[in-house]
Amino acid sequence: MLATGAAGGYGTYSNIKGAYNSGTALGAVAAGEGATAVLALVLLGLTMLGQSSPAVVRAGLWALPAAASVMSAVSAPDGPRTVIYAITPLGMSVSAEGMAFLARRIVVHVDGRDAEAEAKAASVVQALAYHRARAANHPDKKIRERSDRASWRLARKVGTADTTLGARLLDVQRERITTGADVALGDMFAITVTPPTGPVTSGRDAVTAPVTPALPPAPAPTLGEEPVTGGCDAEDTQVNAPLASLDGEGVTPAVTPVTLDQLAAIAGVPTPLIGEPLSDEQIVVVLRFLRYSADPPLSYRQTAAAFREERFTGGEARIRGAWATLMAQEESPR
């Protein structure tokens, strides 16, 4: 690149020297290629520092060699050499743009950010915000219409050539695909255990296993009755209340539904509340409660949908991890 720029400057000098004197040729080269070289160094330095280049620098890289091209073309003795003289000074512009482009790519590769793209994106977003505000609130109807059309034109430029935005969108898409595949495989290979339909006596299912129904409180004695304490009557005789019987057989108490508070107490965690951040253990409790709220128990997809419908707080990744923990607990021997 440096050799190309030097060759372009020497060619311009020799071309103009043939029509004018050496001093005029040297001044033309200094004003054209020399100034272009200065702007190229400025552009290269700003790019290496990770900063965007001013528009006047980019414009000067092409305006100054273009002026030298016109000067060279005027000094050409005939038509064919006019084209050659006009093209020669553009070697400096190509060299400067090539060095800046290569330096910019190196900085993007090393630092992971593109200063030029960020500057353009910020300019587009700022102009878009201004035109949207003017289209909504300006008193002049024609100005509102112009700003509305301008905002739509700017909207097409948002995110253009933004490599960071593209990488983040790909990460989001990969996460969604992974989640969908995990849910689909979970529904396909999940083993649903149907609870027994007969009366529950000694055995309990996965929800009611650790729950012991609490005894109802003793009724308060009414006026005129003496409370019986210690299981004895007034004559200090042991009193045994007869068991309730039906056809001579004892009655098995019915199993009451387990509440979310009881499951939380069994797990030793605070009761999960709607709208509040939940720990991993609380999410497991909520999933267990929702899974066994129906007969047969719900699948992962149904349980996750119920979790969202009840407005509990928890990300998809945490819900999947809690579900894996719940499945491991169910498969472990009791």
Image: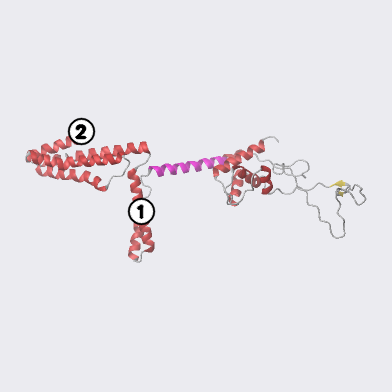
Nearer the viewer's eye, disc 2 or disc 1?
A: 1
Q: Residue placed at 61% from the left, 46% from the top?
A: 303
Is residue 187 something one can see in this rendering? no
Give the labeled residue for mark 2: 3
Q: Nearer the viewer, residue 48 or 221?
A: 221
In this rendering, the answer to whether 158 lies above or below 174 is below
Determine the secondary structure under disc 1: helix
Whether residue 175 is visible here, answered yes or no, is: yes
Which residue sits at x=17%, y=34%?
A: 7
Q: What residue appears at the point 15 percent right and 40 percent down from the top-left corner?
A: 30
Image quadrant assignment for residue 202: top right
Q: Which residues are magenta?
A: 163-184
Amino acid at dot 1:
Gln
Give amino acid for label 2: Ala
- Give percent across and percent down for residue 168: 43, 43
Q: Is 254 included in the stretch rendered in magenta? A: no
User: Which label is found at residue 126?
Assistant: 1
